[in-house]
Image (tube, rainbow, N blue to C red):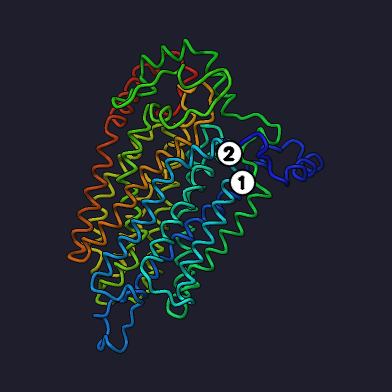
Amino acid sequence: MCGDNGAAPFVPVYKKLLKKWLPKNKRLFYQGVVLILTYITYTCYHCAKRPVSVVKGELAPNCTKYPDPNKTCNAWKPFDTPNSKEIFGLLDCAFLMSYALSMFVSGYIAEHTNMRIYLASGMITTGLFTCMFGMAFYWQIHQLSYFFLVQILTGITQSTGWPCVVEAVGSWFPEGRRGFVMGIWNTHVSVGNIIGSAIAASFVKSAWGLSFIIPGAMIAVMGVLNIVFLVPEPSFVDMEDENKKDDDLSQSGSANFKRKHERSNLVSPNPWSSIDEDDLTAHEPQPIGLWGALRIPGVIEYSLCLFFAKLVSYTFLFWLPLYITNITIGGVQYDDAKAADWAILFDVGGALGGITAGFLVDRTKAPGIINVSMLVLAAPCLFLFKFHGESKLSLFIFYMILSGFFVNGPYALITTAVSASLGTHECLRGNTKAMAVVTSIIDATGSLGAAVGPLMAGVISAHSWDDVFYMLIACDVIAAVLLMRQFITEVNQFRQKRQIANSVVDPDENKPLI
């Protein structure tokens, strides 16, 4: 979490306004401010990620669409080579690998510094490097090393965002209501992709540099606003953290919790890790570090699952527009701008999937069951999308939305509600300073998969798009298998609940099954 001096400059103004106008709704006001600011913040992050996928078709157009490639098909050096897809795959990998490796330490840094300043500085530098990619158009830069350097630096700075925004939201919202709230909140991913696609599509033909410069300016401005307005945790405005309060209540019944734990295995044991609760917490909450976070039950499993789930999601993020330009849909081949518009529908499905997954987890307290079910259903949807959707535009749109729903639903759930819940796990005994580092570990592992996916797609698509989809289907199945222990544990818990339905209801009954 942030340091002790992490309060925003606007906090005194907040307090004066609330004292006069909303003395009884202070928490609700701050929750709204944090939700709005972090929502717009990560919308800007994803808006800045999207232009690369849209501009690929302009940097290295599919010249088979033109009758005379020498006159009408002009690629941008150094992407004017037969292996341009492999080059784009390496560029994507450079960005995502630097993002993933930086993410492993980003959460740790966020816990030990002023998180508000750390987030804002990351946004401003992300804006700078995003603009630098676009300036290659105006500066007539054709050196491949320049594009690789910019992508690596952008990946490093973008890693500052996710641990900070998840911890800020998680600190303001108690565990029982987190799933649905974060499901709606996580639509910023899809909204950012949609806005980024729309901006990039508007300039891709006339001046593709603006496709990067405008999103870069947006995220930099939002970084400045966060410095002034963001309140990352309740203690900065003299309010109690409800997560700590809930943990204190649960500690008062620790003996009862242990009996419940033994009977229904609410905190399911992790075969890959063990944890000594006394090692993780003391009377005063302290940052637990990377090793302590890895020992929290469920962190390794969900991290590995996200590796494959995010691999699939980011392959679509970086390659879907180019894929659409390389196929015929109902006998029609679409250009870059139209392909970017159609690709938006995948994000629409993803937004709906994230909201639905969060709602279902709040109702069932069974994230393992929800994630496995959606991952398994994603496989046939991807198959139909590739091998049946191209025959007709209406079918293509339907399967694309459906695929986005089942592909991005688990990804959204794991990176938000599940990560936040693991960061406030009962074994931490009220230590809420784990959320950023747990989030960074899970998302960093997922981002390694996100780096591998687009790279593999770049290599495989040069030979066959069919094989790309076979790879994506296999990855979704593997992701589901990695959560089978959690899935089986939760199914057994439902059976036990039915067996003791007439017994006294335990106060820990509604705890999430993580």
Q: Which residue lies furthest to the top in this view?
A: 255
Where residue 357 sits in the image (x, y, percent)? 41, 43
At numbered mark 1, what does the secondary structure look like: helix, strand or loop? Answer: helix
Residue 359 in view: no
In the rendered image, which residue does mark 1 sit on? Answer: 117
- Which amino acid does the dot numbered 1 rest on? Ile
Where residue 139 sits in the image (x, y, percent)? 48, 76
For the point 24% across and 37% down, the residue is: 481
Q: How crowded is mark 1: few (under 14 residues within 10 Å), some or many (20 or more)?
A: many
Q: Is residue 324 above or below residue 90?
A: below
State how far apart marks 2 and 1 are (Cα). Answer: 8 Å
> Residue 345 has which mark?
none
User: 259 or 501: which is nearer to us?
Assistant: 259
Quarter of the image where the N terminus is located: top right
Residue 222 in view: yes
Do labels 2 and 1 touch, CB within 8 Å?
Answer: yes
For the point 29% across and 67% down, the residue is: 323
- Which amino acid does the dot numbered 2 rest on? Thr
Where residue 398 sits in the image (x, y, percent)? 33, 61
User: 106 or 260: which is nearer to us?
Assistant: 106
Left or right of 41 in this view: 437: left
Q: Residues within 10 Å of mark 2 (few under 14, many from 20)?
A: some
Where residue 62 sits in the image (x, y, percent)? 28, 76
For the point 44% across and 35% down, the residue is: 438
User: 367 or 454: which is nearer to us?
Assistant: 454
Looking at the rendered structure, the number of numbered marks drawn on it comes to 2
Q: Which residue lies furthest to the right in this view?
A: 20
For the point 47% across and 74% down, the residue is: 202
Left or right of 329 in this view: 349: right
User: 314 or 351: which is nearer to us?
Assistant: 314
> Residue 113 has which mark?
2
